[in-house]
Image (cartoon, helix red, strand yellow):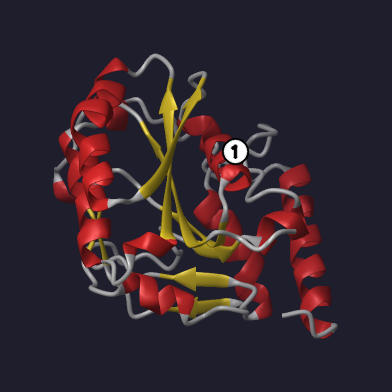
Amino acid sequence: MKNPEFDIAILLPTRGRAESLERSIRSLVENADDISRVQLMFGFDDDDDVGAEHFKSVVQPYLDEKEVEYTAMSFKPMGYIRLNEYVNALALASDADWLMFWNDDALMLTEGWDDKIVEQDGYFGLLRMPCVNMNHPFALFPIIPRSWVEFFGRVSPVNHSDWWIYNVTVPVNRMKNLPVQVYHDRADVTGGNNDETFREQSYAADGRDPTNPEDYSHPDRRQELMDWIYKLDDKIKNGNN
């Protein structure tokens, strides 16, 4: 593998969001210590005229002005149920040491957040940024090394990638908390962004239907999870950190 050009790639599937996406991006850019080492990876549905137009007219000029590197990828709409497929594609197209998941309704609160990530270079595992307004054990905005994709072949096989990565890494003590705080302006938590994008989210694969092959409670998914855990454990035991 060639040496990555950037330190951090932000993986950001987005749909139908305009002002919230802009606020989210500004919070990342303005709180970064060195934005030149960050690559933004956007994923748009090809029928999302609202999000695409705002990106072209407002977000893109802002990123150009700030000299931020970005890539905008277009997808056939797959919906929330296949969110991991957006993330997997963005990860494979990225060119950075670290992959950071992000949402268009999230706000970065910590100055120098990029420094805190880069300081962990060489660590193979999950970096967790606490979400200040959601007391949740998972890493809702997980950060993993790019080498995760080469090692496992993809980021995650289920739409709840945060659940998957958390449950792969925690059993083998491969999660670190970072002193980086994020605010999640999600409709069912804050009342913000209660829009069509939020209302159309599908939670069908949410661990409650073991008959659904897409669901992480399905026996095949549970076995795959154990396979990933064993594989990571073997890597650690062999000193490949």
Q: Quadrant of the C terminus?
A: bottom right
What amino acid type should be assigned to the residue bearing mark 1?
Ala
Residue 126 falls in which quadrant of the image?
bottom right
Q: Is residue 175 above or below residue 41?
A: below
Q: Is residue 83 above or below residue 123?
A: above
**Residue 99, horizontal then vertical, whole percent:** 52, 58
**Residue 43, horizontal then vertical, whole percent:** 44, 34
Residue 3 falls in which quadrant of the image?
bottom right
Q: Which one is in front, 211 or 195?
A: 195
**Residue 65, horizontal then vertical, whole percent:** 21, 46
Q: Is residue 185 visible?
A: no
Q: Residue at x 16, y 50 (%)?
A: 190
Q: Residue at x 24, y 68 (%)?
A: 132
**Residue 141, horizontal then vertical, whole percent:** 41, 58
Q: Is residue 14 above or below residue 176?
A: above
Q: Quadrant of the N terminus?
A: bottom right
Q: Which residue is mark 1?
A: 89
Q: Residue at x 70, y 42 (%)?
A: 218
Horizontally, residue 115 falls left or right of residue 224, namely left
Number of labels in the image equals 1
Q: Which one is in front, 39 or 222?
A: 39
Horizontally, residue 225 falls left or right of residue 71, namely right
Q: Residue at x 81, y 59 (%)?
A: 227
